[in-house]
Image: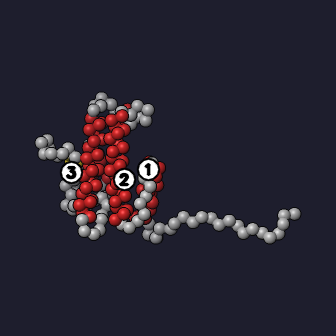
Amino acid sequence: MLEAIWLALNEDAGESEPSPPTPLPEGEGSNALRSHSPSPSGRGWPEGSGEGSGVAIDKHRTAIEAAAQGVLDARAKFPDSTLADLYDPLTMPPALVKAHQVLDRAVDAAYLAAEKTAGRKAPKLGSDAERVAFLFQRYQALTSLLPAVSAKTPRKPPKSNVAPP
């Protein structure tokens, strides 16, 4: 299933792109997902600059992969449940909620580190709304041909010296 999702997301990718993540075979250590990426950071991972940034990227990647595997493991505890059942906000299993919270924290840490490395202000990522707002800002910055413009506060009209009739 992971391979199908990977291929759908990377449909336009050339042959030089990394292959989809796959679980490690039994008995080879961690159950974390591994990517067979030709580069240390792989596609889609924040690129750092400076000495030692590859280690930081690998640390965050490993944390995200382990947390993602935790989500998959939590889902596997409920083999008879559909995704609709598992993700119903009223009946979502506590183990799955916790696994997603761990994944959210790992992803947040990676974004915070990437923003710090890039010299940008660290975003607030305390809620889903703040995460979505941050992701849309990054998307706009990455896809816009124009430089980012900060939001301007509207000016109040000047007060008139003439008294009302």
At 33% from the left and 31% from the top, the residue drawn is 81
Q: Are marks 2 and 1 in contact (CB under 8 Å)?
A: no
In the image, residue 76 above or below residue 20: above
Query: How many tags in the picture?
Result: 3
The answer for how far apart the CA atoms under marks 2 and 1 are is 9 Å
User: Which is nearer the N-term, disc 2 or disc 1?
Assistant: 2
Mark 2 lies on residue: 108
Secondary structure category for the residue under label 3? strand
> Residue 113's x, y, as percent?
34, 59
Q: Is any atom of residue 148 visible in this view?
A: yes
Label 1 vs label 3, nearer the camera:
1
The answer for how far apart the CA atoms under marks 1 and 3 are is 28 Å
In the image, residue 144 above or below residue 65: below
In the image, residue 82 above or below residue 131: above
What label sits on residue 2 in the rendered view? none
What crowding class fits label 1: few (fewer than 14 Cα within 10 Å), some (14-19), or many (20 or more)? few
Question: What is the three-letter code of the residue carrying label 3?
Answer: Arg
What crowding class fits label 2: few (fewer than 14 Cα within 10 Å), some (14-19), or many (20 or more)? some
User: Which is nearer the N-term, disc 2 or disc 3?
Assistant: 3
Mark 3 lies on residue: 34
Q: Are marks 2 and 3 in contact (CB under 8 Å)?
A: no
Which quarter of the rendered picture does the N terminus lie within? top left
User: Which is nearer the N-term, disc 1 or disc 3?
Assistant: 3
Label 2 vs label 3, nearer the camera:
2
> Residue 107's x, y, as percent?
34, 52
Question: What is the three-letter code of the residue carrying label 2?
Answer: Asp
The answer for how far apart the CA atoms under marks 2 and 3 are is 20 Å
Considering every residue shown, the one lying at the far right of the view is 165
At 60% from the left and 64% from the top, the residue drawn is 153
> Residue 155's x, y, as percent?
65, 66
Mark 1 lies on residue: 126
